[in-house]
Amino acid sequence: MEAIKRYHIYALLAAVVVADQEVLAVEVDTFVNLATQLHISLEHGQVDSHEVLKAWFDDHHAGIRKALLSDIEKGRFLVSNLEPLIGFEYCWQVLAAMQAIAVSDNELHKTERELIQTAANYWGLKYPE
């Protein structure tokens, strides 16, 4: 997986973690685990360690959280991270990881569901209503 695609995938997964404006440990742990699993299944080789992924999240989550507060910035964030993944053969796996992160705290928040639905629509995929 190209580094640029990896960045966009991580950004979308992290967006689900912060979508409800809370950062819960269980969601961060799920982000790290699923980002690792995605990376392993897509790369079949060297992957970012849990520490690297946690550091990536720590470095980026505040900016992502801020972008999601404004409709205009949220739109820019989504387009800039969804557009490079159009036609990416693993979009379903990314959606599944987004969903798993969203429900890892045993609750699917409206904002999380909207992010996942937006990604599915943008990529031309059918996401269950």
Image (cartoon, rainbow, N blue to C red):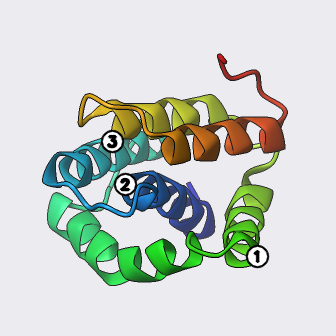
- CB-based contact (under 8 Å), mark 2 and mark 1: no
Q: Which residue is drawn at 55% across and 37% down?
A: 113
Disc 3 or disc 1, which is closer to the eye?
Answer: 1
For residue 68, say whether it is visible.
yes
What's the distance in space between the residues labelled 3 and 2, CA to CA?
12 Å
How far from the left and from the top, in percent, is residue 13? 46, 52
Assign the C terminus to one quadrant of the image.
top right
Q: Name the residue carrying label 2.
A: 17
Per the image, label 2 sits on a secondary structure element best described as: helix
Q: Residue at x 20, y 55 (%)?
A: 24
How far from the left and from the top, in percent, is residue 41? 42, 35
Q: Is residue 115 above or below residue 117?
A: below
Of the two numbered discs 3 and 1 on the same chain, state the one appearing first in sequence: 3
Disc 2 or disc 1, which is closer to the eye?
Answer: 1
Q: Name the residue carrying label 1.
A: 72
Q: Is 44 positioned to the left or the right of 115 in the image?
A: left
Q: Quadrant of residue 48?
A: bottom left
Binning the other alpha carbons within 10 Å of mark 1 as few (below 14), some (14 to 19) or many (20 upward) gives: few
Q: Which residue is drawn at 67% across and 69% down?
A: 74
Which amino acid, by three-letter code, is at mark 3? Leu
Which amino acid, by three-letter code, is at mark 1? Ile
Q: Name the residue carrying label 3.
A: 34
Of the two numbered discs 2 and 1 on the same chain, state the one appearing first in sequence: 2
Per the image, label 1 sits on a secondary structure element best described as: helix
For residue 87, say whether it is visible.
no
Residue in the foreground of this view, choosing between 122 and 5: 122
